[in-house]
Structures are given as C-alpha cells and as structure tokens.
Image (cartoon, helix red, strand yellow):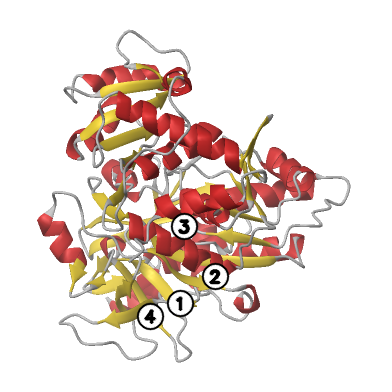
C-alpha cells in the first residue's frame, strides 16, 4: 500500500515539474528542481547535526524561500515542524518549544535577541540561524546545507507520522499543540485544490505569515499541483497590487484586514488597476465584515470571492462560493467535500435547521489531538467528531452560519448575547473601521456588553451615535452598555482580535457609559 504523505506529494511535484518555476520572493526565483535540492540539503544537514525522525523542529522565519525549503526538508526527513510566531517574545517562544519538546530551532537572524532570551528555558535546544550565526548556534543553516548532498534522505515517512505541531493562537487561553499528521496535510491539499480549482497553470500570491495553518497549507497546495507561488515577506497593499499585476497572479489568500488595505490601495490609484489574470480571492482567518465584502465586490466586480471557515484542528470546514456571496449574508458556506458538520444543543440533542448550537465536525483532515493535553483533547474529540468551541446554525439548504465563539458569549440577565452580531451592526456604521464586543461585569445584569471601537480615518462618531445606530437593528438587551474608542485593537497576525487582552484590561478610564435603552427601562 502506498503511504499517503505530504512528503510524497511534494517529492512527486518536484520530480514532475523540475524545470518549471516554483517560488518567487523578491529577486529570488527557484524552480521545482532547485527547491527540491535545497530542501534535501537542509534535511541532510539537520540529520547530520544529530536530529532524528520524529524530533520536534521549531521554525521562526519570515515568509521566504528558506521557509518553504525547511518545510520540504522536515517533510522528507520525518521531522515534526513547530511553526512559531516571529512577533513573540522570549518567554512566549520558550513555552511552545518547551511544551512540545523541541529538539532544535531554525530562526532568522533578526530574531536573535528573543531567541537568546528563550534559550535558558529550553535546555539542550539546538539552534540554527538563517543569516549570521552566533557562538550559541549549531551553525548557519544554509552554510551547513551547502556541504550536504542534494539527494533525498534515506528515510521512509509514514502517513501516521506527525508532520507538524501547530500551537493555537491562545486568543482564549494558553496555546495548545494541535497534532497534524502527514496523511492529514496530504488530504488537505487535495481537498483544497479541488474546492478552489487550483491547477498547474495557476500562480498564487501569499503574504499572510506562514506560521499560520492556512497560508502555509495554501502554499503547499499550489506547489503540489505543480503551480507557482509568489511570496511577500510582509503585507503592504501597494506592493501586493504591484505583484498581482507583474507576476500574473491568478489567486491569493488574505485575511480581512489585508483586504481592507487592498481596497484602499485600489481606490487611491488614479488609474484603473488591471489584473487580467486574477481569477479569485480567498478570505479567511477571521470573519469578513459585510461592508468589506461589499466594497471588495464593487472594486473587483468580475472577481470570484471565497470566504472560508476553518481551524488549525480541522483545516477548512466550510466555504462560501462566489455565486453565494450576495444571497447568503453572514454565511460561511457549505461544508467541503469529505466534511460533515452538525449542530448540537446542550445535552447532545441535534439542533433543527436555523437553531444555534455547538458546531461539531467530522472529516479526514481532523487533527490527532492536543499534544500531552488529554483533558482538552477529550473535550474537543468525541467518537470521531471534533469541536473548536464555536456556535453556529445551519439553514434549510445546508449552509453554515457562525454565531460566535462559545467563550465569547455574554450572559446578560440570564440571556445569551452574541458579540459577533453586535459587531456586525457596528461595522455597518460609516464611521467605524473596527469593532470588538466583550462581556464585562455588571452589578445589575451580571454581565454586560462593552464595545471597543476604532473609528475610520476622518470620522469621530460618539458612543451615543453608535448606540442609536445599533438600536435600529438590535433588541434592547443586546445593546452595548458602554463604548470605548481606541486607535487600534490588539490583533493576532491572522487578523483575529485578541479579546482576552481586552478583557484583561476591563473598562479603562476613558470608557463612557451609555444610558439604558427604552427596552431595558420597560423591562425594569
């Protein structure tokens, strides 16, 4: 039986497309053959340094050719990748490395200060620099790789072997390591390619950080299909527009805040932006606000727009196709092929169509559990089904709607209030750029909704103005009891608001309390 592995999928892509272009990053261009040779040299260098198949390998690099080569190397050598957020500090780096039992870390030289701070908390950690190495490192990775053969390591990777250990963002608690197998990612790239129609003639642009599941897996999807990937190390809307045109990009994945920037960049151009080859955009990582979606469809009227719902633990769960964008408001689409979704009420009863409950998923791309965390694994995995703590509903046609995160739901006067619903209404106000709603202690209601708002440039809406706007669409018990204005919100690199940080600060001094609504007065 042939083992279904991402290692084999990548190797076959290299063998079949050796002379074809694979990667573009700045002035660097690699063919599939060159990518395979570099990846094999890196794999052999890591094995020569003492790493063994199954060892955990931390990776702290910006989007780059080297990042993709390290992924290829880890897959071929049977090493377990641990992608690390390069924005983290020393203690934050040390936690997943220590918790996951990392044997080695590959890092870019610009992150040395934080890596040095983390070393003491991870005894025996081997570090390899990309760029100038320090005395504490085992060496400079590319220099070590240049001394090794370009042939594949003599090791057979099995489909049940771990491919990477993906630590969750920790937006609602301490990060946990989701175990992803070789088989899991091999199936994911096939399902994703089928869903979006990705082929060998496509060119994908990726700018979201590779230490997140979606941008990395989308990159692997395009490579395994024999197509080209254009990499940008960081998001710059003007640079994205330029690369979309110059490289003949056919599709791209971006998170919502990037799409907002793209819209602004297009609107600032004095001439029409010609993107003749661009077929579709994919939005994910966080909910795409309706105003952003409508603006995107206006700016790119002939472009296909997809919006997916997914998680590190499950891959892509559902996708809203271009044909459904205008008729299915606040919807994330139907489950992908090979994905089953059910909505469960408290007590385990299946929810009827239109009724909200916990989202449970079953598919071939489910994770294998959380590393050394049996209690969270038991809560997340039951009889082949998994949940990541989201609440949703399914309509009569089988389309999925995300209501909110279970941990974000506000209990006000014994009634559940969903922050996502309030946020969507606030975002429809022309003066609001970003909005996040959290629950705060309230002497009267037990918990009350508190809105944190970032005003759109050139606008200065008041709290009362926003409340009046919300009253037109929301019942009184759902209205925020206070509004706070900030210049920005704490965001993860994936574009998710870090509500845990907002809750930790509670109500700052500048937050202005709003008067009760008429509905509240009547209820009293």
Marks 3 and 2, the one that precedes in the sequence = 2
**CA separation, marks 3 and 4?**
17 Å
Q: To which residue does mark 4 refer?
A: 393
**CA separation, marks 1 and 2?**
9 Å
| Disc 4 and disc 1 in contact, CB within 8 angstroms | no
Mark nearer the viewer, 1 or 3: 1
Marks 1 and 2, the one that precedes in the sequence = 2
Q: To which residue does mark 3 refer?
A: 286
Please state the horizontal and vertical placement of residue 138, each as a whole percent of the image: 31, 16
**Horizontal placement of 94 versus 509: left or right?**
left
**CA separation, marks 4 and 2?**
25 Å
Query: Which label number is shown at residue 337?
Result: 1
Marks 4 and 1, the one that precedes in the sequence = 1
Judged from this view, the residue extending furthest toward the right is 271
Please state the horizontal and vertical placement of residue 44, each as a whole percent of the image: 38, 30
Marks 3 and 4, the one that precedes in the sequence = 3
Mark nearer the viewer, 4 or 1: 1
* Mark 2 closeness class: few <14, some 14–19, many ≥20 residues within 10 Å: some
Residue found at x 44% / y 76%: 401
């Amino acid at each position: 039986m042939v083992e279904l592995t991402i290692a084999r999928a990548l190797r076959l892509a290299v063998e079949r497309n050796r002379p074809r272009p694979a990667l573009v990053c700045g002035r660097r261009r690699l063919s599939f053959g060159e990518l395979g040779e570099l990846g094999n040299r890196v794999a052999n260098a890591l094995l020569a340094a003492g790493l063994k198949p199954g060892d955990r390998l931390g990776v702290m690099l910006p989007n780059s050719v080297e990042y993709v080569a390290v992924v290829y190397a880890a897959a071929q050598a049977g090493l377990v990748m641990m992608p690390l957020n390069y924005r983290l500090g020393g203690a934050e780096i040390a936690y997943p490395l220590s918790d996951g039992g990392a044997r080695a870390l590959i890092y870019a030289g610009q992150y040395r200060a934080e890596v040095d701070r983390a070393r003491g908390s991870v005894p025996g950690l081997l570090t390899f620099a990309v760029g100038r190495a320090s005395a504490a490192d085992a060496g400079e990775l590319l220099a070590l790789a240049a001394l090794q053969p370009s042939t594949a390591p003599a090791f057979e990777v099995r489909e049940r072997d771990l491919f990477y250990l993906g630590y969750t963002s920790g937006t609602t608690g301490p990060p946990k390591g989701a175990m992803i197998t070789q088989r899991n990612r091999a199936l994911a790239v096939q399902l994703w390619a089928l869903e979006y129609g990705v082929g060998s003639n496509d060119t994908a642009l990726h700018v979201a950080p590779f230490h997140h599941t979606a941008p990395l897996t989308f990159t692997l999807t395009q490579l395994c299909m024999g197509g080209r990937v254009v990499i940008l190390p960081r998001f710059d809307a003007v640079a994205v527009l330029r690369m979309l045109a110059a490289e003949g990009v056919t599709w791209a994945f971006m998170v919502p805040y990037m799409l907002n920037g793209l819209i602004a960049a297009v609107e600032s151009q004095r001439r029409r932006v010609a993107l003749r080859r661009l077929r579709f955009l994919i939005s994910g990582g966080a909910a795409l606000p309706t105003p952003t979606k409508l603006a995107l469809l206006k700016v790119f009227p002939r472009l296909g727009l997809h919006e997916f719902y997914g998680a590190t633990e499950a891959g892509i769960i559902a996708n809203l196709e271009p044909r459904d964008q205008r008729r299915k408001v606040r919807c994330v689409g139907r489950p992908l092929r090979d994905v089953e979704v059910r909505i469960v009420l408290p007590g385990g009863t299946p929810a009827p169509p239109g009724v909200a409950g916990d989202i449970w998923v079953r598919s071939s791309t489910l994770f294998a559990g959380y590393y050394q965390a049996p209690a969270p694994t038991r809560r997340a995995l039951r009889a082949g089904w998994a949940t990541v703590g989201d609440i949703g509903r399914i309509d009569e046609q089988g389309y999925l709607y995300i209501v909110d995160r279970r941990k974000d739901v506000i209990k006000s006067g014994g009634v559940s209030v969903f922050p996502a619903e309030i946020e969507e209404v606030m975002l429809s106000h022309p003066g609001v750029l970003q909005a996040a709603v959290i629950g705060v202690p309230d002497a009267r209601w037990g918990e009350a909704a508190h809105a944190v708002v970032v005003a759109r440039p050139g606008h200065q809406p008041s709290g009362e103005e926003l409340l009046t706007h919300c009253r037109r669409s929301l019942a009184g018990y759902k209205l925020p009891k206070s509004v706070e204005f900030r210049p920005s919100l704490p965001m993860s690199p994936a574009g998710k608001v870090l509500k845990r940080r907002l809750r930790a600060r509670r109500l700052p001094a500048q937050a202005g309390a709003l008067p009760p609504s008429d509905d509240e007065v009547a209820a009293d």
